[in-house]
Image: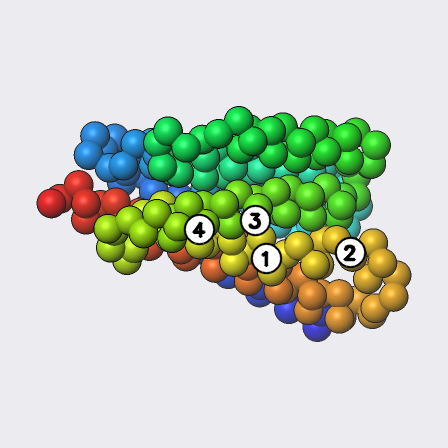
Amino acid sequence: MSKTLINIFDSIQLGIMLLSFIVSLKLAKSKNAPKYMDGFFLYPLVAVLVFSYSFFTTLISKNLYQFAHISNNISLIFHFSFLSIFIIRAMSKGKNNIYIFLIFGIFISLLFVLLYNGTLRKLNGPAFATANLGLAVFCVIYYYRLFDNLPILNLRKEPAFWVITGIFFCMSLNIPMFAFYNYLKIRVSSYNLILLKSIGAFGYTLMHVFFIKAYLCSIRLQKQ
């Protein structure tokens, strides 16, 4: 029952990721979409490839599960770097102060240390929690600058707002689970652990739904 449940959650997540990638391709050759959306299709592409590998590997055999963890742990560097750089680019021009890059340097350094000192063959909860916390911090900085300056923007039509809101919701949902993953793995039943993992799956699914909304906003902007 628990295996069926997690397969359902994973299938839904993979389907939404694939849809996100397909819609993002419409912007790949666009010259009128916001500059910060250039190359964004790479993120859902990597997400689909990594998650597909993990999904089908675990379906084939439990003995291959460690290889799924290896791909997930390695892709964490791309996940954090790509999305944090996107948020930095989306912030107002002329305000990317040195402390923004200092924050990036601190989190990316911590990430490398945690991955180096941990094993790649198991889910590295502290590393995932650190990456997600760093992205949440960048999202908060973006919101602070956005509303502090009271910009004349229709946020419903602003692609960056939807992307970063999706990132913020996803990271906020996942930080507690990853931070206490090693503890929960020992203390709770396998069924309850799967339910907790489903919260994470919901977070990533929701993030890509927000990405799709951002793509559609970009497509409408280039038609205007």
The answer to whether residue 15 is above or below residue 93 is: below
C-alpha distance separating marks 4 and 2: 29 Å
Q: Look at discs 3 and 4 and give the one toward the viewer.
A: 4
In percent of the image, x 48 and y 29: which residue is there? 97
Q: Position of residue 189 (x, y in %)?
A: 83, 70
Q: Amino acid at mark 2?
A: Tyr
Q: Amino acid at mark 1?
A: Ser
Question: Image quarter for residue 198?
Answer: bottom right
Quick check: can you spot residue 178? yes
- Say which mark, if any, is on residue 136: 3
Task: State if disc 4 and disc 3 touch (CB < 8 Å).
Answer: no
Q: Which disc, if any, is residue 30? A: none
Location of the C terminus by quadrant is top left
Residue holding disc 2 = 181
> Between disc 4 and disc 2, whose residue precedes?
4
Q: Position of residue 111 (x, y in %)?
A: 70, 34
Q: Position of residue 20 (x, y in %)?
A: 39, 49
| Residue type marked 4 | Tyr
| Residue annotated with mark 1 | 172
**Which of labels 4 and 2 is toward the front?**
4
Question: What's the distance in space between the residues labelled 3 and 4, CA to CA?
Answer: 11 Å
Q: Quadrant of residue 130?
A: top right
Whole-Å distance between the Cαs marked 1 and 3?
7 Å
- Crowdedness near tag 1: few (<14), some (14–19) or many (≥20) residues, C-alpha within 10 Å: some
* Amino acid tagged 3: Ala
